[in-house]
Amino acid sequence: MDHVETYVSALFTVFILIIFIRILLSFSPMAPSSRPARAFWDFCHQSTDWFLNFFRRLIPPLGMFDLSPILAIIVLYILRSLVLSLLDSF
């Protein structure tokens, strides 16, 4: 069962890292023009939009500041601990 917990924890960690990368990419004023950089940009946006849009409905952006990634990361850490404690109980 230890392998399942490690795998689930790694999935949560990777998704949190992608959200952090997306936060860093938001400081760039434009999408990159090179094909590989554009593919990475699109991957980060498309893989997190479905999750962040839920939080954007709860807390709309405040001018230039979008607080939805912060709330999403907090929720992911809570979900991670809940899921890992459930897996640990089996």
Image: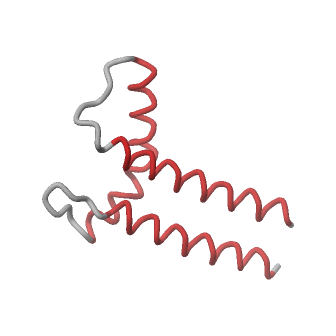
Where residue 10 appears, as percent x and y from the top left, is 68, 55
Note whether 34 is above or below 42 in the view shown: above
Where residue 26 appears, as percent x and y from the top left, is 30, 44
Q: How is the image coloured?
A: secondary structure
Which residue occupies 45% across, 45% down?
A: 21
- Judged left or right of residue 87, residue 48 is left
Note whether 77 is above or below 63 in the view shown: below
Which residue occupies 37% across, 17% down?
A: 34
Where residue 55 appears, as percent x and y from the top left, is 33, 66
- Judged left or right of residue 57, residue 76 is right
Which residue occupies 26% across, 66% down?
A: 57
**Residue at the far top in the pictured view:** 34
Give residue 64's quadrant in the image. bottom left
Where residue 76 appears, as percent x and y from the top left, is 52, 67
- Judged left or right of residue 71, residue 15 is right
**Residue at the far bottom in the pictured view:** 89
Q: Nearer the viewer, residue 49 or 34?
A: 34
Give residue 56's quadrant in the image. bottom left
Which residue occupies 40% across, 53% down?
A: 50
